[in-house]
Image (tube, rainbow, N blue to C red):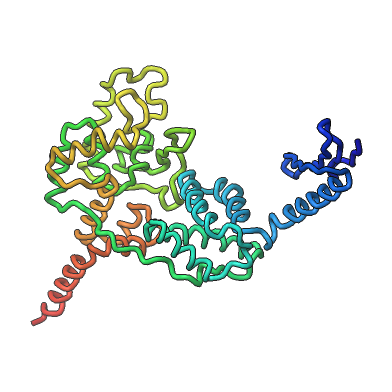
Amino acid sequence: MSRRANGEGTVFLRKDGRWSASITLSDGTRKTIYAKTKTEAADLKQKLLQEATKGEMDQFTSNQTVEVFLFSWLEDTVKPNLRWGTYEHYRWCTMHVVAEIGNIQIQKLTPQHIQRLHAKKRAQGCSPQSVKHMHRMLGKALNDARRWGLIERNVVSLVTPPRVPHYEMKVFTVEQARQFLAAAEGHFLEALFVVAITTGARQGELLGLSWDDVNFQAGKLHIRRTLDRQKGKGLILVEPKTERSRRTIQLTDLALEALKKHKKNQQQLKGYGEPGWNEHNLVFCNHFGRPLDHAVLMNDYFHPLLMKAKLPPIRFHDLRHTAATLMLQLDVHPKVVQEMLGHSSISITLDTYSHAVPTMQMGAVGLLSNLLSSGQ
């Protein structure tokens, strides 16, 4: 048997008469190949060492492939710094991207590669929105690669993402909103629906509310956490999506009264006050004091309520859109709406709710007309 120093690999004769060449990789795993002669095994071992050394050198340089870079970026940059849902979404995008261009070195990527990625994914049945998500994810990753000096330019920025068909937002009219609230009166989760349609808060933000976040005296709601479902962990409370999402919202009298009534009703639930019951002091929990599951909320409470109110099916998130639309139509300043919704910029608010702009324009034109004609 012929042995080598640690880190250089080994060559030895097996009981079956074959020669074995084996090396230990940097991650602790061993790679082994077999040969007929000792000389052949030694040559193969040397080749293995050269390939392993080159691979480790290329791993964090501009020679690394799209696959190596993206998975490293996911684990070392995205996972520790962004929400689990974002990580899972980026990982899904990465699997699609790697399947098409994963073997190309990041420094050799061209705009044509990105265009081909778009075309192949559309041909495979992916929606324009899904392809646009892949485009944005890859763009973010390569922006980091450029900042780190791994590439000179981000080729994704040179390619136009797919055009996504306009989504017609579903919102309640004033009359439909009244129908909805009337149907919710006396419901186990009446306060949840009232707060949702009067504040525009996100579903996860509402389900993550603690009674400590409700200031009855000041009539305010503090968004500090959100309820999220993570793979392998179930429902957990996490930090809000962005710093802007951490905010304070002024409550309507309607919402305040609903919350006061809800708190009294919660205290009548079986098990209330016992050790472990509603351990997070949640405003909206189920009958057993546990966090409300999204699917249960939709299937057992929200959809049946819409049917009871004889309203068209919408998403829970559309209550947020309804709140924003109604406020803008009431001439509430877009900056106020932006702060209530937790948008990062006022442009996002105006772009998202552009359908409300014509109504705002009509009001502005009427005011301008009255101003200019008042002296006549």
Between 302 and 357, which is closer to the camera in this rendering? Answer: 302
* Quadrant in the rendering for residue 217: top left
* Quadrant in the rendering for residue 333: bottom left
Name the spot of residue 372 as percent of width and height, x first: 15, 79
Q: Residue at x 37, y 42 (%)?
A: 204
Relative to 289, residue 224 above or below:
below
Between 308 and 237, which is closer to the camera in this rendering? Answer: 308
Name the spot of residue 365 as percent of width and height, x first: 17, 73
Residue found farthest to the left? 376
Name the spot of residue 234 as percent of width and height, x first: 44, 33
Q: Is residue 210 visible?
A: yes
Q: Which quarter of the image is occupied by the N terminus?
A: top right
On the rendered structure, is 349 left or right of 79?
left
Name the spot of residue 165 as percent of width and height, x first: 31, 63
Q: Residue at x 28, y 23 (%)?
A: 267
Q: Residue at x 41, y 61 (%)?
A: 123
On the rendered structure, is 155 left or right of 353?
right
Relative to 301, residue 113 above or below:
below
Q: Which quarter of the image is occupied by the C terminus?
A: bottom left
